[in-house]
Image (cartoon, rainbow, N blue to C red):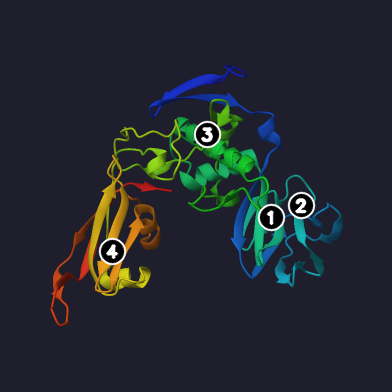
Amino acid sequence: MNWKGMWPRLRTTVGLGFLIWMARVTPLSASVFVRVNITEAPQVTIGSSTAARILSSDGRVLAEVDPLSPLTASSLGSAVQLGDVQGDRLFLQPSTANGSVFIDDVWYRGSVELRLTDGRLMAVNHVALESYVASVIGSEMGGHFPLEALKSQAVATRTFALYNHNKRLQKPYAVGDDQKWQVYKGIAAESPTTVAAVEQTVGEVLVHNGRLINAVYHADSGGATENSEHVWTNPLPYLRAVSDRDLVSPRPWEKQLSRQDLQREIVGVGQVRSVDVVERSPQGRVRRLVVSGDAGSVSLTGREFRQRFRLKSTMFDVEPGAPIRTASVAPVATPSAYVIKGRGYGH
């Protein structure tokens, strides 16, 4: 769909069983810098492609840095140590507009903030919103999809970033760089097509009742999306379950978990004897299951089980493997492993 020339009017988009508005937030988006948490580690190596400056939290220049000169950051008590400079929060900012920064071995646009949060050294990339969007498109999709698909991703990515930017203004960062948020791999993920997708959608976002939506998305829905309250807590009118029109979805997956795998991750059940799904969402996703053993039972949400065992989604079935007989006063046949057969792949 070509939106050129239709702005600044609002346009409507009908999808997923709800009505949302597509709006343009320029020039606001041009001035927004997304704060991306790149790493938390005892030490971080940073530097700049051009001459740069180390700034204090109030903007004072503390030191000048040569191009391509790695600096090691670490914690020193309650302060950040960067080279010979110390401070509660330190910034490395290229001196020229075309400068870029590296954090460990990855290059990013923008600048780097170093800070201690709960005793952890954190490196946060401050990057212009539209540069961030171009990288996320490449990180999440790559640049080989049709331009209209990349443009759709650009709108969702921008909306998600601004939603979290506004929600987390008082937090150390707005988003992370992994699948919990949006995958962000810096400059290396950009391409001419991802940049074109950004340029042709600059400032376009999705809103509902005048507010940015939480524009979550997935790689594969497993055949259907889900109502928000079946994943989190609150029902959202714009996140309603619908059948997926993806012609190559669902893609099945399978993972085997041994009894030892289960016992290592789920404390308090002893020797595992059964894994039973006791509640599903209307779309078939696991909402709750019970793992039982000779020492007790533990109830887990589908989301908890998925996270513990790194499953691709909560749309799965549990099938017992070949039985073995346990050595006890009253021998019981129990599965040696459990096969998890699922569909879908989401954040």
Nearer to me, 34 or 300: 300
Mark 3 to mark 4 CA distance (whole Å): 36 Å
Is 6 located above or below residue 172 in the figure?
Answer: above
Identify the disc placed on residue 213: 3
Counting residues from the start of the chain, the first of labels 1 and 4 encountered is 1
Mark 1 to mark 4 CA distance (whole Å): 48 Å
Mark 2 to mark 4 CA distance (whole Å): 54 Å
Residue highlighted by disc 4: 291
- Please name the residue shown 65% across and 61% down the image: 122
- Please name the residue shown 62% across and 19% down the image: 8
* Callout 1–callout 3 Cβ contact below 8 Å: no
* Callout 1–callout 2 Cβ contact below 8 Å: yes
Categorize mark 1 by other alpha carbons within 10 Å: few (<14), some (14-19), many (20+): many
* Callout 2–callout 4 Cβ contact below 8 Å: no
Residue highlighted by disc 2: 94
Q: Position of residue 150 (x, y in %)?
A: 48, 35
**Which amino acid does the dot numbered 1 rest on?**
Val
| Element on which disc 4 rests | strand
| Element on which disc 3 rests | loop
Categorize mark 3 by other alpha carbons within 10 Å: few (<14), some (14-19), many (20+): many
Q: Is residue 177 visible?
A: yes
Q: Is residue 34 left or right of residue 320?
A: right
Q: Position of residue 346 (x, y in %)?
A: 39, 47
- Please name the residue shown 54% across and 45% down the image: 136
Is 315 located above or below residue 223 in the figure?
Answer: below
Q: Is residue 62 left or right of residue 342?
A: right
Of circles 2 and 4, the one toward us is 4
Is 172 located above or below residue 266 in the figure?
Answer: above
**Which amino acid does the dot numbered 3 rest on?**
Ile
